[in-house]
Image: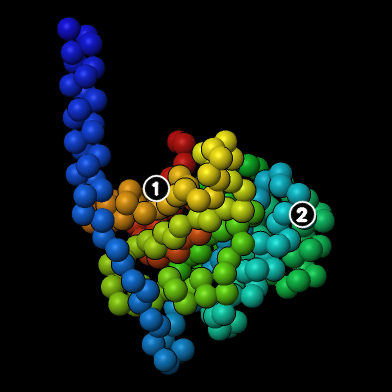
């Protein structure tokens, strides 16, 4: 009986997975208006804890190269490691530096603490080893102007390092990687059900929406 119920469960989950991905919603880029005064302000958060400066530096410098009005874009290095060399680096390159007295709730707590100290209409989050493209904000922000109910734009993550399948199979990069499945049919399928979720990085979120749910989810 137990094996029968297990098989029924597997088939139910398989059916639900098919329903999740059978109607993927493929969105295009929403262009920003020509009038830059209408573009929203954006705070870019780069949270870090114990990563070396050699890794974080490229992420910060890439964020500074994003093609967006400088008076509408502010970059903040959120250092939960409280490292003096990070504070010096942030001052040298001209980005904000935020730290806190404790590490409560880890990354979520770090982000929520920054929310109380900044004012941008939109929040953009990059993990400290994720390098943004120059067009990142112009490719993601337009949707927030078109749809006032839009809360989140999550973009795919692309990695230089191969995933386990690419690394262990002889075909290597000639096969689709795990990210193409997750950020393709799965997330696009979720989007059709209004259920796409934040993946922790490479995303833009409306501050007002975050405020309505009490900020980034953390363990209570």
- Packing grade of label 2 (10 A; few <14, some 14-19, many >=20) is some
Residue drawn 68% across the image and 53% down it: 79
Residue 196 visible here:
no
Residue 46 lies, with reference to residue 104, above or below; the image says below
Q: Is there any visible trace of residue 190 in the rendered image?
A: yes
The location of residue 204, given as percent across then percent down, is 45, 64
Query: Residue 205 at what x, y percent from top left?
Result: 42, 62
Q: Residue furthest top?
A: 1
Q: Where does the C terminus fall, quadrant-wise? A: top left
In this view, the mark in front (2 or 1): 1
Left or right of 103 in this view: 17: left
Residue linked to disc 1 = 182
Residue 53, which numbered label?
A: 2
**Residue 7, x across and y down, in percent:** 21, 19
Give the quarter of the image for residue 122. Answer: bottom left
Helix, strand or loop under label 1: helix
Left or right for 211, reference 22: right
Q: Residues within 10 Å of mark 1 (few under 14, many from 20)?
A: some
| Quarter of image, res 209 | bottom left
Whole-percent x and y of residue 157? 50, 55
Q: Nearer the viewer, residue 125 or 28?
A: 28
* Quadrant that contains the N terminus: top left
Q: Residue at x 27, y 67 (%)?
A: 149
């Amino acid at each position: 009986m137990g094996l029968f119920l297990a098989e029924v469960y597997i088939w139910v989950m398989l059916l639900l997975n098919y329903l999740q991905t059978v109607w993927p919603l493929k969105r295009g880029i929403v262009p920003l208006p020509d009038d830059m005064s209408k573009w929203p302000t954006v705070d870019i958060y780069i949270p870090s804890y114990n990563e070396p400066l050699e890794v974080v530096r490229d992420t910060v410098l890439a964020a500074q190269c994003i093609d967006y009005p400088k008076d509408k874009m502010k970059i903040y290095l959120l250092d939960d490691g409280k490292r003096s060399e990070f504070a010096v680096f942030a001052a040298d390159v001209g980005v904000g530096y935020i730290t806190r007295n404790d590490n409560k709730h880890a990354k979520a707590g770090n982000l929520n603490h920054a929310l109380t100290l900044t004012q941008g209409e939109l929040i953009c989050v990059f993990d400290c080893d994720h390098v943004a493209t120059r067009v990142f904000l112009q490719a993601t922000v337009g949707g927030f102007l078109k749809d006032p109910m839009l809360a989140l734009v999550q973009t795919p993550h692309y990695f230089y390092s191969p995933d386990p399948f690419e690394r262990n199979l002889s075909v290597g990069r000639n096969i689709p990687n795990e990210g193409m499945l997750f950020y393709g049919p799965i997330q696009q399928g979720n989007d059709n059900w209004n259920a796409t979720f934040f993946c922790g990085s490479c995303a833009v979120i409306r501050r007002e929406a975050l405020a309505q749910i009490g900020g980034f989810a953390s363990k209570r």
